[in-house]
Amino acid sequence: MRVMAAVLALWTLGSASALAQGSDSTRKWSFGAQAYTYFVPDSRDYVQPTFTADRSQLHLEVRYNYEDMETASVWAGYNLSGGAELAWEFTPIFGVVFGSTTGIAPGYKGSLSWRKLELYSEGEYLFDADNSSDSFFYNWSELALAPVEQFRLGFVTQRTRAYETELDIQRGLFVGVNYRQLSLTTYVFNPDQAKPTTVVALAVSF
């Protein structure tokens, strides 16, 4: 709880500072908040929140329960983008991880969009400070089809150590709806198994 309180305090201070500076278009910030609620069979359910702030090329991010339970990570990165019909975005990031698991982690976030299709992926390699054998590559990837602007569906894969799983790479399906700055998405991992994992994600941007 102390780790979470410290993360939220840092985020609040950073947000307040950003809003104080953001008086013109060249200093405009955009913010995002996501909460992924995991319903894991034969294990504890948990919420994984993520907060982001972007200003021009600068990307800042805070995660909790992403690499491990009761573990936070703080990130900074550089936004790159381009393309017209085939649009792309790529953000190399670097993070510090602390809590139940500690270490440093280089990573990335990126997407490719073409008409109604989008490929999104985020990943990191955590160098565990306590035990190098526990270092691990985390990944979340989606291939989405958006037949209309407010609806999307597709395939998702995940590689994580936040909870115990028999599969090195989990795979599944998802369906999502959005309205203005709000989106709600449901993911079902390993639907062919007797006890699949369900994730419900609520996101807002402003």
Image: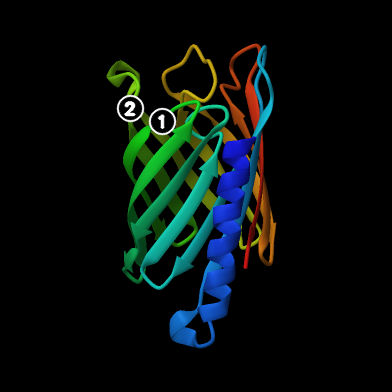
Disc 1 is placed on an element classified as loop
Q: Amino acid at mark 1?
A: Thr
Q: Quadrant of residue 59?
A: bottom left
Q: In the depicted view, which residue is nearer to us: 198 or 6?
A: 6
Disc 2 is placed on an element classified as loop
Question: Mark 2 packing: few (<14 Cα in 10 Å), some, or many (20+)?
Answer: some
Mark identifier at residue 102: 1
Please report whichever mark, 2 or 1, sits nearer to the chain's N-terminal start.
Answer: 1
Residue 48 visible within the image: no
Q: In the depicted view, which residue is nearer to us: 50 or 104?
A: 104
Relative vertical location of residue 185 with respect to residue 158 in this rendering, above or below: below
Query: Quarter of the image containing the C terminus?
Result: bottom right
Residue 26 visible within the image: yes
Relative vertical location of residue 122 with respect to residue 203 in this rendering, above or below: above
Q: Are marks 2 and 1 in contact (CB under 8 Å)?
A: yes
Q: Residue at 60% of width from left, 60% of height from top?
A: 12
Provide residue 113's location: percent of width, then percent of height.
41, 59
- Spatial CA distance of label 2 from label 1 is 6 Å
Provide residue 82's location: percent of width, then percent of height.
31, 69
Q: Residue at 60% of width from left, 41% of height from top?
A: 4
Provide residue 80's location: percent of width, then percent of height.
32, 64
Q: Quadrant of residue 15?
A: bottom right
Question: Mark 1 packing: few (<14 Cα in 10 Å), some, or many (20+)?
Answer: many
Image-based side of 117 in relation to 94, left or right: right
Provide residue 173's location: percent of width, then percent of height.
57, 34
Residue behind mark 2: 129
Mark identifier at residue 4: none
